[in-house]
Amino acid sequence: MAKPKTHDEALRLRLLHRAAATVFDRGTAALSLRQLAADVKTSTTAVYSLFGNKAGLLSSLYQEAVRLFIARLATVRPTDDPAGDVIRIGLAYREYAVANPHLYAILFSDRSLQCPSDADRPREVIETYQPLVDAVSRGQRAGQFSSDSTPEVIALSVWGMAHGLVSLVLSGNEPPGLAVADCYERTLQAVVTGWREAEERVPEFAGAP
């Protein structure tokens, strides 16, 4: 009978998520392979077998953050309302960040973890950004968004707003008495409305003083 495989995918994921939590809390320098193995109740041999060394672990950690982020955005399926899809992608963005703050920080904040993957970053940036660009492009073809700017520029403004508000939450810098959760979707809607074709915006403000 073959011996059971102990260095499996489940162990790899446990190690990655524990490593991500350590980096989020204390930084890359605090990540010790020996301590990581002890935290997950495995051996350093298992860590080296799965990742090679610390650099390999950090690279895998960044790749896992990218993979899960792309998978979360992919759950937002295109509909016949592209402008609504943009808002739903923005909501998925926030949900991923709040549910996985350690992975989100690694993906968008910790440059030291991105270094091992610099050769792949152009491809990864496109993959994380593309669903939003595609939704805006469909919105332009449907006459929902202004054609005066490229879809990349419109998508960037939505992404920047989402990232800014999410970062306030994760860094603990929400202004006293104000909660991003209470205004996040309305802010998304305001950005989307601002990029709509002028003739589409008029009915929304009809009758305004």
Image (tube, grey):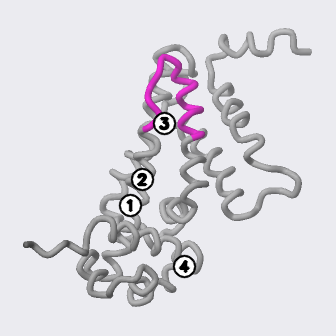
SS at badge 3:
helix
Label 2 Cα neighbours within 10 Å, binned few <14 / some 14-19 / many ≥20: some
Mark 2 to mark 1 CA distance (whole Å): 6 Å
Query: Is there a contact, CB below 8 Å, between mark 2 and mark 1?
Result: yes
Front-lying residue, 73 or 5: 5
Q: Amino acid at mark 4?
A: Gly
In percent of the image, x 88 and y 53: which residue is there? 177
Mark 3 to mark 4 CA distance (whole Å): 30 Å
**Of tags 4 and 1, which is closer to the observer?**
1
Q: Which residue is mark 3?
A: 132
Q: Quadrant of residue 44?
A: bottom left
Q: Point out the stretch of residues depicted in magenta.
A: 75-91
Q: Earlier in the sequence, mark 3 or mark 4?
A: 4
Q: Which residue is mark 2?
A: 68
SS at badge 2:
helix
Q: Is residue 109 above or below residue 192?
A: below
Q: Which residue is mark 4?
A: 27
